[in-house]
Image (tube, grey):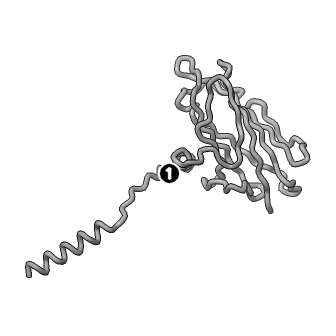
Amino acid sequence: MKTTTNIIIAITLLFLSSCDFKVSTNSGNKTADNLNTVSESAQKIRNGITYDGSGGLKVETAFLMKDDGELVPKDNILKAGERFKLILKLSGWQAENGKVLIGAGERLRNSNQVVMMQEDDLFASADAISEEDAQVITLIMEVLNTETLYDFYETDFKVWNKNAEQFVRGTYQFKLKK
């Protein structure tokens, strides 16, 4: 009887040692979860996003995410009318008293180079935010005209520090399908 018990314990231990236990780190905040996933991957800049910067402000991570939390695929093809976000993780802000006064602008052009939307400063009336909060900037994009689709759309963006000579500017393209 004791031998049978020892065999059952040995089989149980062997079974448990071959199981793969994983702890879920899903926070429930899809932006934060995707930011962690992309930040820990080899490809930290995705979706054909190109950028440059000045004043020590650096892009650590940049990607596009659909409104529902799903990452935009590499081909950047979205459904007409679908909202999505540019997520930027930035470092190197020059803060004053632990605060940063941010500006951010976007311009959307179609493949014919016609400007469809331009916002010079999305944070024009915003107060300064903590340096920690300034590390992740989210800019929302949505093409409202879903009747006429163009070959592609291009978004230019700029994020800057209003109290120091710091900025990051860049661009990305996407396509819409019906």
Secondary element type, mark 1: loop
Q: Is residue 1 above or below residue 91?
A: below
Quarter holding residue 172:
top right
> Where in the figure is residue 17, as x and y percent of width and height?
29, 66
The answer to whether 37 appears left or right of 81 in the picture is: left
Q: Residue furthest front?
A: 42
Quarter holding residue 131:
top right
Name the residue at 54% across, 27% down.
Answer: 130
Residue type pointed to by label 1: Gly
In-front residue for pair 151/105: 151
Q: Quadrant of the C terminus?
A: bottom right
In-front residue for pair 42/102: 42
> Where in the figure is residue 40, as x and y percent of width and height?
51, 46
In the rendered image, which residue does mark 1 sit on?
28
Binning the other alpha carbons within 10 Å of mark 1 as few (below 14), some (14 to 19) or many (20 upward) gives few
Q: Quadrant of the N terminus?
A: bottom left
Name the residue at 28% across, 68% down.
Answer: 16
Name the residue at 57% across, 33% down.
Answer: 135
Count the labels in the image. Answer: 1
